[in-house]
Image: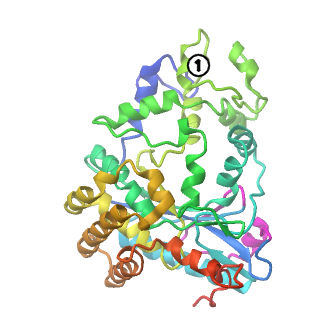
Amino acid sequence: MTGLTTENALIRNTSDVEDFARGCFLGSTGDQVGVELEFLVFDRMAPDLQVPMDRISDALPPLPGESKVTFEPGGQLELSGTEGSLPDAIARLAADVDVTRRALWDAGMALVGVGLDPLRPARRQSHLPRYETMAAFLGAPYGSLMMCSTASIQVNLDLGRNPAARWERAHLLGPVLVAAFANSPLSEGRPHGWMSGRQMVWERLDPTRTTPVPVVEDPAAAWTDYLLDARLMLVGEEQKKHRGREIRETDEAHEAEGQDGAIHGGSTLRDRLGASAHSLTMTDLAYHATTLFPPVRPRGWLEIRYLDAQHPANWPVCVAVTHALVMDDRTADAALAAAEPYAAMWSQAARCGLADPGLRKAADACFRAAIEALPRLGASADLVREVAAFADRHVTPGRSPAADLLDLVRGPGRRLPAWLTEEEPA
């Protein structure tokens, strides 16, 4: 990268930030996909209580698909599958989900795919320095809810030979896919008024790090400006974590930082670079990028981050549709023609889901395009049938998955959703 020979070299000016941003769009030119699934875990006999992470870990056997197991701060379980072709990535991760679901069930727990915890208040189990700083920086209630109560499907896609095209598609399709897979309408046992409560939580966080990156002709330029104009959360945290040493405070700006390297004011990266002695390094910049959470983030691949977690049996549909619409050139034209009029309707999609007539119509066109494309992308006949069944159940009638959850708590005498005590996994 021009001007930065080591990770601890000082960032001289905004040109060095642009070099870093352009590097985020350099990656594989192929068509592979990687999937990260977050789930909530409930004690089937006491669904109002948090389940300790150690209890979950102790119940898990080796996973046949070799997914990586990690936890979010509130104890959400994350399975990160191995990247590969669409059919291979889904098959390996599906095997791991099945094993995980069975093992947790046998240990008295339920693996639940929903975007926002429908019952329990936010409570943090992990107190790593990064999470301590994030909690203080983002504040309550939405920072706590984001960290401890949300769950998502993250679809990671190769950049391909034309990264700008896939970047644009991932954004323009966003509201339609948010609506189609909205699956978080409850909080503390009651409806909160949004079909995707998870997306609502993200919208109410620091807008300098959660709003969409503008879609322009040069996506790297847009990402450069986003990096520069986002407020700094951490400086030096990564150096301390890996090297076990304190940061040397070299300018007045550092005096306002906590001992963990947190920036407690509102200074942006651009502000700090404009100071007479900013002392920011390449490592600081790379870490800063990890604290930004736009709906689509470039990291040498595209991270699509706006999808609610889905029922353990339905997540392959979400991945398959997203992959087909973003990666396949033939499919993209029809999908974008339907979705582009709604490209700015992130809030409407999260609030109304497929109950919005325009979003429902666009989703119907996108699903039809995906179903036509999936066989030539290597999807199995079973997966294509699952996508079609999801469309019949949710898209055609204009009922996001959230509508099913709302039905379960609106019946007489019903307080808990039935899926918390679903039938025994196969």
Q: Is residue 104 above or below residue 24?
A: below
Q: Does any portion of residue 85 appear in the rendered image? A: no
Element class at badge 1: helix
Q: Nearer the viewer, residue 239 or 378?
A: 378
Q: Nearer the viewer, residue 128 or 334?
A: 334
The residue sitting at the top extreme is: 276
- Range drawn in magenta: 49-74
In percent of the image, x 72 and y 74: which residue is there? 42
- Residue 365 versus residue 19 in the image, above or below: below
Please name the residue that numbered disc 1 is placed on.
272
The stretch drawn in magenta includes residue 92: no
Instruction: Say if 417 sits above or below 32 in the image.
Output: below
Seen at 36% across and 34% down, the residue is 220
> What x and y, as percent, mark residue 75?
72, 62
Tell me which amino acid carries mark 1: Arg
Q: Which residue is at a point 68% across and 47% down the rendered structure image? A: 143
* Closer to us: 146 or 414: 414
* Residue found 36% across the figure and 52% down from its top: 170
